Amino acid sequence: MKIDQEIARMEKRSRQRRSAILAFCLSLPPLLACGSEALRPEPSDYAQATNWMVRPQAESPAAAQAVDVFFVYPTTYSYDHKTGPALTAEWSPQWNQSLAQAYVDPIIKYQVESKIGVFAKAGAKVYAPYYRQASGFDVLNSVLWQSTPQFANAANQAMQVAYSDVSAAFDFYLAHDNKDANGKSRPFILAGHSQGSNLLLYLLQDKFKDPQLRKLLVAAYVIGWSVTSDDMKSFPDSLARVGICGERTQTGCIVSYNTQQTPGDWSQLAEPWRGKMELVRKNAYSVNPLTWSATGPGDVEAAAPATANLGAVFFKGSLPGADPGLFAASPRYEVNHYTAAQSDNGALVINPTALPAPATYENLFAPYNTLPGWYHGYDYSFFYRNIEQNVIDRIQAYRLKP
């Protein structure tokens, strides 16, 4: 019996590896090829409690919440080229943050705590695994911006490593944590930012052919990374069946947006230095968090006014140019009606010169305080209360579904 179980376990891991590689390869620009699977290490073990940044303690079945959140944090790791050996076209462990490094990375803690608060008012339980994230700017330079295409193979491997962990953590969560008082699977939300959202996109592509998983999905907040019409065409049986959220109470769908000053994807911008600082991909969808309406590739919507902004929330450290006394009484500082926003050709466009004091763009942290045209690090903060309310609205709508 034990031998049979071990064979089954090995076959399952093999399927996971093949699925992860397929999901990532099909989401790449067509000229970039995926590398050999042989270099990629095995997924991390999520039966180990230390491999979870947030995992709620076991409760009595009667106390279990009705909805969970599986959260994947953004990039906090970029390889230090000044102190380490040069990265090469072949993958090496330096392309990924180790779990040992993740455990002591204070930025991970900040990123998780400053974002998962949007789920607290809804009473959802958050599960956030540590994972071996890829070196952020090295992957973007080689895969998205294509300024170092010679590293594409290694970058692909790095993302495969990161996804193998997220995939394994999600499988473990489903098998061990996602149960209600009667042992029935609970509905859940997927949420992330930046690299975390990119990995959630792979998860949706890879696993959501399963109609039972799609049925349990309240919403996927794939924020800070683009979801495109090309992604939908490449995965008609999974991603396309989930689709984009078109209104504020739609469930089982994807919310995606990227906050910046200019419309369109990065390749359309005249200034190369500015284009390199944006993440909008060609043919992207955009969901406006002030209206929760969606636009398709190339579409432009009417701008939503700042009065629709229920409140931006800034955490201590996120306004380094402002008076430190703002955070003397609380680690949070809130600004009502902070910014207007408009979905325009795949981007969520704001006017940074109209941001009110003290949270003007000059007081944001680098590089956003030099007006580079993107506001990626503030995708949650600028629309914090709107996201918080939308989580409540979608959970209520999910519960009312027949």
Image (cartoon, rainbow, N blue to C red):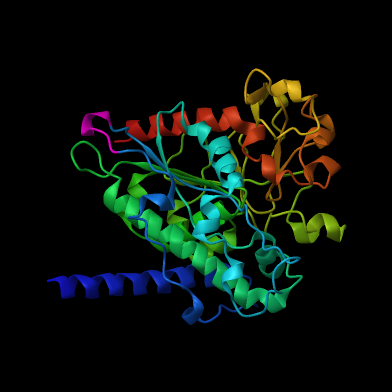
Against 150, is 368 above or below?
above
Q: Would residue 28 be found to the left or right of residue 253 on screen?
A: right
Residue 97: image location, x then y, percent: 57, 61
Q: At 72% from the left edge and 21% from the top edge, which residue is drawn?
A: 326
**Measuring 27% from the left and 34% from the top, which residue is drawn there?**
59
Say whether residue 60 is magenta.
Answer: yes
Q: Position of residue 181 (x, y in %)?
A: 21, 36
Which picture quadrant has residue 10? Answer: bottom left
Q: Magenta stretch?
A: 58-63
Question: x, y (%) of residue 142?
Answer: 69, 70
Q: Nearer the viewer, residue 50 or 151?
A: 50
> Which quarter of the figure is the N terminus placed in?
bottom left
| Residue furthest to the left | 1
Q: Residue at x 52, y 32 (%)?
A: 118
**Displayed quadrant of residue 332:** top right
User: Residue 208: in sight, yes or no?
Assistant: no
| In this view, 127 is above or below 398 | below
The answer to whether one can see residue 251 in this image is yes
* Rendering quarter of residue 112: top right
- Residue 29 drawn at (x, y percent): 64, 71
Q: Residue at x 61, y 77 (%)?
A: 153
Relative to 370, say whether 44 is above or below: below
Extreme-top residue of the structure: 329
Depth check, front residue: 292 or 153: 153
Nearest the camera: 82 or 256? 82
Q: Nearer the viewer, residue 175 or 45?
A: 45
Q: As drawn, is 312 to the left or to the right of 115?
A: right
Which quadrant is home to the C terminus? top left
Judge left or right: residue 388 versus residue 176.
right
